[in-house]
Image (cartoon, rainbow, N blue to C red):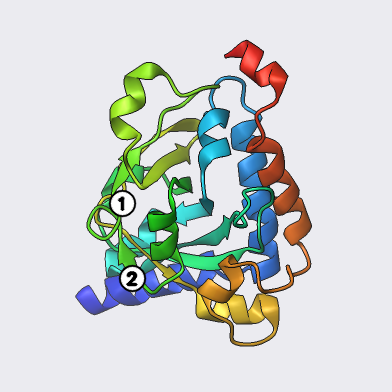
């Protein structure tokens, strides 16, 4: 019976991730736009403006948790050293941990903000575990970060989830992130490391323009935004 369950789960997993890297990149942009365009329910823009990197994983599937393997794919993008623009996307995988019990529902979108250079260094390396190798906390929801969330602002990574239309901060302690080498190979045409991509040394692949534009839009705090705060 155990072998049957594992085999079925692997079959489900293969179906989940049958889309191409380009299609997943488009879905990533769509998820970001939908979350940030929901009035007063998105990621606080003042936090987004301070973030060094963002990680977006669309349609994370709980079913794959049965076999304890990877169950989320998405992309990470980091700012350049001047904080003036976002670099090309690097594919990532989310796996393990207790996320499978927390996210609920059949599919969940996850967004993580990397808030400092130390967290960014973890992202440009190999696999790292949230809560162990990098501190993580559930992010606040709304137009701006309220004063009551200050205790969480020391976290290297803030995280959110959206499932069945509900958007909220979520704890991802115990989950791990690693570069998706095969996905990056598909996007860039050859073997390239996450560090090379996130450092901005690679030309952005086709389809990344929309994501870059969306990141720039939502991470820019205008005078009008400051007035609303």
Q: CA distance from mark 1 to mark 2?
A: 12 Å
Q: Residue shown at 31%/48% (left/top)?
A: 172
Q: Residue shown at 66%/54% (left/top)?
A: 86
Label 2 environment density (alpha carbons within 10 Å; few <14, some 14–19, many ≥20): some
Q: On the rendered image, what quadrant is the C terminus found in?
A: top right
| Residue toward you, 119 or 40 | 119
Q: Which of pointers 1 and 2 lies earlier in the amino acid sequence?
A: 2
Q: Position of residue 66 (x, y in %)?
A: 29, 64
Q: Position of residue 4 (x, y in %)?
A: 29, 76
Is 142 rendered above or below residue 160? above
Residue that badge 2 annotates? 69
| Residue toward you, 45 or 169 | 45
Label 1 environment density (alpha carbons within 10 Å; few <14, some 14–19, many ≥20): many
Is 147 rendered above or below residue 162? above
Residue that badge 1 annotates? 99
| Residue toward you, 148 or 65 | 148
Q: Secondary structure at mark 2?
A: loop
Q: In the visual, does 138 lie left or right of 216?
A: left
Q: In the visual, does 96 lie left or right of 114?
A: left
The total number of labels drawn is 2
């Amino acid at each position: 019976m155990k072998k049957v369950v594992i085999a079925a789960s692997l079959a489900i997993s293969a179906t989940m991730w049958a889309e191409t890297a380009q299609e997943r990149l488009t879905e990533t942009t769509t998820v970001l736009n939908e979350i940030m365009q929901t009035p007063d329910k998105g990621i606080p823009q003042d936090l987004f403006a301070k973030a060094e990197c963002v990680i977006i994983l669309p349609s994370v599937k709980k079913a794959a948790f049965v076999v304890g393997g990877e169950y989320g794919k998405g992309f990470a993008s980091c700012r350049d050293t001047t904080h003036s623009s976002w670099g090309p996307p690097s594919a990532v995988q989310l796996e393990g941990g207790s996320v499978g019990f927390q996210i609920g529902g059949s599919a969940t979108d996850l967004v993580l903000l990397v808030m400092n250079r130390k967290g960014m260094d973890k992202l440009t390396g190999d696999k790292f575990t949230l809560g162990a190798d990098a501190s993580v906390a559930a992010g606040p929801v709304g137009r701006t970060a309220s004063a009551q969330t200050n205790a969480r602002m020391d976290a290297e990574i803030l995280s959110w989830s959206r499932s069945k239309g509900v958007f909220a901060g979520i704890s991802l302690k115990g989950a791990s992130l690693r570069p998706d080498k095969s996905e990056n190979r598909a996007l860039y045409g050859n073997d390239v490391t996450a560090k090379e991509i996130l450092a901005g040394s690679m030309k952005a692949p086709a389809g990344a323009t929309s994501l870059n534009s969306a990141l720039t839009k939502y991470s820019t705090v205008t005078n009008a935004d400051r007035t609303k705060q």
